Structure formats: C-alpha cells, structure tokens
Image (cartoon, grey):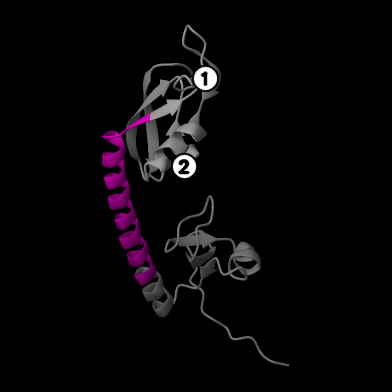
C-alpha cells in the first residue's frame, strides 16, 4: 500500500492550518493571501479544489509572481478605463423615442438603450455600468452617471428626442 507523503503544514496562531490562496475565495481572501483555516476545511474543500496550496518557499514565489502579473494587468485595465471615461465624458448620445405632444415618452429609455447608443459610437459600456435613478420618461437632455469598474465613474450626456416626422 502506498504511503502518503507528509508535508509539514504550518500552524496558525489559532491552531488552524496556514494556506496560501490560489483563487478568490468569498469571505476568506484573494489569491496570494496567507490565511488560517480549520484543518477539515483545508483538507476537504480548499486543497482538493485547487483553491489553496501549502505555503512552501516555491509556492510563495509562484504566488508572488502571479500577484505581480495580476497587479500589472489591473493597472493596464484601470488606465484603459480612465481613457474610456474621458472619451465618454466628452460624448453626447442622442436616443430617438416616440412621445406625445407634451414630451412624455410612450415607453421609457433605460440602461440597455443608453448602452446600445454608446456601443454604436464604439464606446464599450454594458447596461449594468449605467446608473439611472429611474427610467427616462420625457424628452430632454440628461446627464447619466456610469460606473465603469475599479471605482472609475464618469457621466454621459443623453439627449432624448422624437424621431423625425415621416412624410
């Protein structure tokens, strides 16, 4: 019968196992964090699923390199989002919607319509990034807030107009 290799596991200050996370684990930590968990949770859940690893010198070096790559990718993404935010702030989108004589829309303009109008101008904004207090129901000029991610916010000017009369 094969014998199990015994790897020395560091004990934490509370008597649990110390592990290094390799994935984001809700309510526990992010990749690269050194955490202390109960031995059963480590053996039965984190280690078999590859969500954590034993903190050997080699594993700690790998995790540190991985953290640096993630940090560089995050910085590049933040720079891209800041450039996108600047483009959006200088943009005005026009959305056509049917309305009555007083300017009340028959339907409403919401996040999907605003997202579609921005994508038509090659600005990649998903509907969940649009922060509306409620649907737009009247013909007017609006300033709509957008949350692009990583705490980067901007606003876009949205003009809601009637479609041109067909003759």
Instruction: Give the percent coordinates (x, y) of residue 89.
Output: 28, 34
Quarter assignment of residue 55: bottom left
Mark 2 or 1, closer to the camera: 1
Q: Which mark is residue 122?
A: none
- Magenta span: predominant SS is helix
Instruction: Give the percent coordinates (x, y) of residue 153.
Output: 34, 36
Quarter assignment of residue 85: top left
| Mark positioned earlier in the residue sequence (2 or 1) | 1
Instruction: Give the percent coordinates (x, y) of residue 126.
Output: 46, 42
Residue denoted by label 2: 126
- Residues 159 and 42: in front is 159
- Pick out the residue farthest to the right: 1
Q: Secondary structure at mark 2?
A: loop
Residue denoted by label 1: 98
- Going 49% across and 32% down the picture, which residue do you hit? 113
- Residues 105 and 150: in front is 105
* Dot 1 alpha-carbon crowd within 10 angstroms: few under 14, some 14 to 19, many 20 or more: some
Task: Report the Cα–Cα distance between label 2 and label 1.
Answer: 24 Å
Q: Secondary structure at mark 1?
A: loop
Q: Is residue 134 above or below residue 93?
A: above
Inspect the magenta stretch and tell me whether residue 88 lies in it.
Answer: yes
- Pick out the residue farthest to the front: 167
Q: Is residue 28 above or below residue 109?
A: below
Inspect the magenta stretch and tell me whether residue 43 lies in it.
Answer: no
- Going 62% across and 62% down the picture, which residue do you hit? 41
* In this rendering, position of residue 75 left or right of residue 11: left
- Residues 164 and 38: in front is 164
Quarter assignment of residue 3: bottom right
* In this rendering, position of residue 107 left or right of residue 31: right
- Pick out the residue farthest to the bottom: 1
Q: Which residues are magenta?
A: 65-93
The reply to whether callout 2 and callout 1 are in contact (CB within 8 Å) is no
């Amino acid at each position: 019968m094969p014998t199990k290799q015994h790897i020395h596991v560091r004990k934490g200050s509370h008597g649990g196992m110390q592990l290094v996370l390799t994935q984001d684990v809700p309510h526990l930590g992010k990749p690269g964090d050194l955490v202390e968990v109960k031995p059963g949770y480590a053996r039965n859940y984190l280690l078999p699923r590859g969500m954590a690893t034993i903190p050997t010198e080699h594993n700690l070096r790998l995790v540190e390199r991985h953290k640096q790559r993630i940090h560089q990718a995050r910085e590049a993404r933040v720079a891209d989002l800041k450039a996108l935010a600047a483009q959006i702030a200088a943009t005005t989108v026009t959305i056509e919607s049917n309305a009555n004589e007083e300017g009340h829309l028959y339907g409403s303009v919401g996040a999907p319509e605003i997202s579609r109008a921005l994508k038509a101008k090659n600005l990649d904004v998903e509907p969940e990034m649009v922060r509306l207090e409620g649907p737009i129901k009247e013909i007017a000029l609006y300033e709509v807030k957008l949350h692009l991610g990583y705490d980067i916010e901007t606003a876009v000017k949205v003009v809601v107009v009637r479609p041109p009369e067909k003759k």
